[in-house]
Image (cartoon, helix red, strand yellow):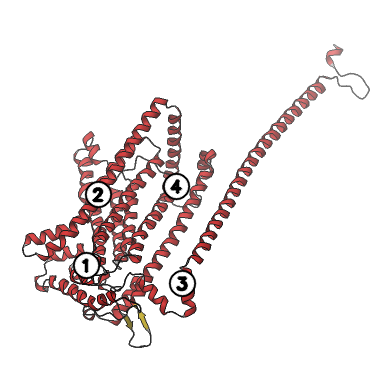
Amino acid sequence: MDFAVVLTPNCKCRNRYEMLKSCIVDTWSNSISDNETFLYENDTNCCTKYYDEIKSNLPERDNYYLIQLVQDGVQGTGPLELSYLFYGYYPRHILVLEVAPEWKYNLPLAYLLVLVVTLILSLVLMVRAAARGLRESLRSSEGQFYQYCNLIFGGWDYCIENNKASSIKKKAIYNELCNHLETERYNEEKEQRTKKERCRLYMVRLLVNLVVIALLFVSFVAIYKSTIFAFDHLKDAKDSKESEQDKLMILLFEYLPSGVIVTLNIIIPYLLRALVKLEHYTPNSILVLTLVRTVSLRLASLVVLLISIYQSIPSCPDSKPSVCIDECSQPWCWETYVGQQLYKLTILDLIIMFLTTFLVNFPRKCIGHKLMRGSQIGAAIGDIEFAIPKHVLDIVYGQTLCWLGMFYSPMLPAVTCIKLVLVFYIKYFDCKVNSSQSSQLYRTSRSNALFISILLVSFIVTIIPVGYSIAEIKPSLACGPFRGLDTIWSEMLAVIQESPDWLKAVLLFLGTAGFAVPAIIFLILAGYYYYAVAAANKHMVSLLKNQLVLEGHDKQFLLSRLNHMIKMSAEEEGENTSARSSRPVEDETGHSNDQTLEA
């Protein structure tokens, strides 16, 4: 959508070199203060400084070495910073088509609407998937009293026609049966626990939760401190870059926040998976706890990263707007800086997957199963379980980075699509070659619903910082389609003010309490109505189940009575037959044919 609505008009109407020089803004708000006027008149200076700074850092084409190309490709700096990949390259212009000058294309509005429409479509699709997964989960839990009968007699798919599909289906049924047996074993063990064992287990779980909270807190502090430190020292390092040591320091400061996040995402989940085994939960509970804790770490780390960047953005005092002009909001284009951080996290995530799969797990497999075959050390080294929660969270984390960075880096969804293709083959190799079957069994239907729910929670958490930056934070003066505005959402308000009176009245009414309060009341009443309907349906289902049970009892009673009557009838018929056989038989003349009596 970004490519069709935002990127194509830019490429069609202006070439790259004109875009680099386009620091003059075409559109302003009609109602601005004196300080804002001062900022509007001087932001061209910041924009020019920004592009001059970037171009001065670009080496000559003849001196552009391969290592610099790779470094810029991974960091999103150099030529990539002056490309459509990042927010700062898009100008604040109304594009005019040469073939139809009367048609104007508001690029800032298109940039904002693409984000809003994309997020709404993502939300709708995820809600539908979550509802479908929830229905499947409820359907699978309905037959819990007859789960073994349902699996054995009704679990087979008779549409399967090939051996591979049938083998997969057999394994799925086998895993479901093993999961049910494991759950029953856990429930029996839970009922047999003594009071002392329960108290000891609760103390262990309390300590584990305290350790988890401490690990998460330390992780957040490390991310916050590293981001603030890198943000504060990056400007000094760039200003004094003269030697190779200064360039190395710049590289370290650029990678410090992303490196800390990636390192924590590697180390902390292993600790969480080790701690959850001490709590002695069921496999499904272990899956839920592991996912919730790991997702909390990854989502909160991204939120802390953005909060620390937002706090480092210098604000412009109303009384001294020249301070903002002089400083030019270092980094001059903070939106591009945020996009670069999320772009680096996306690239580093792919690099870590590749290195872990081919340079860690594959050598472990070869050493454990070929060089040290048959030994306990070889088994410990070479046995790598395919951890389903970890691999699923890798996909969720990549999608979260895409949602979080698509505003600051409009082409990040395209980068994520390419990354997902590569991730598929990396995970396929890891599953087929490196990994063995997981020792923990998961129910398919509930796991799918859980993963979709976690993705939905990730989406909700993602839109909070993005929405805050759009509604509250002042855009950079040096770059972007919204420079010179109070907030990014001011562009939408300016468009509403220029719309026809009837449309403006409707849109403004939608933002007032006169619409919000009745809408909230209506949603509450609608929610209560559907809750009451669901409760009534649930009660009706319970009654129908009880009726079916009673009808089954009646059927059993009737069948037992029928069997008893049949048995009695058979016994009576047998007695009559024996009586007839023992009675003397007379011929037509009335003489007896009983040979015994005659004798």
Q: Which residue is drawn at 35% across and 36% down?
A: 206
In the image, taking residue 242 as reference, residue 208 lies left or right, namely: right
User: Along the polypeptide, which appears first: circle 4 or circle 1?
Assistant: 1
Q: Disc 4, disc 1: CB below 8 Å?
A: no
Residue furthest out toward the front? 319
Q: Nearer the viewer, mark 4 or mark 2?
A: 2
How crowded is the residue under tag 4: few (<14 C-alpha within 10 Å), some, or many (20+)? Answer: some
The amino acid type, in three-letter code, at marker 3 is Leu
User: Along the polypeptide, which appears first: circle 2 or circle 1?
Assistant: 2
* Residue pointed to by mark 3: 508
Mark 4 and mark 1: Cα distance apart in space: 49 Å
Residue 131 seen anywhere in this rendered image of the structure = yes
Residue nearest the viewer, comparing 424 with 550: 550
The amino acid type, in three-letter code, at marker 1 is Ser
Residue 194 seen anywhere in this rendered image of the structure = no
User: Along the polypeptide, which appears first: circle 3 or circle 4?
Assistant: 4
Q: Disc 2, disc 1: CB below 8 Å?
A: no
Mark 1 and mark 3: Cα distance apart in space: 33 Å
* Residue pointed to by mark 1: 329
SS at mark 1? loop
* Residue 544: x %, y % from top left: 63, 44
Name above or below for residue 149 compared with residue 77.
above
Mark 2 and mark 1: Cα distance apart in space: 25 Å
The amino acid type, in three-letter code, at marker 2 is Val
Q: Nearer the viewer, mark 4 or mark 1?
A: 1
* Residue pointed to by mark 4: 446
SS at mark 4? helix
Which quadrant holds the N terminus? bottom left
* Residue pointed to by mark 2: 221
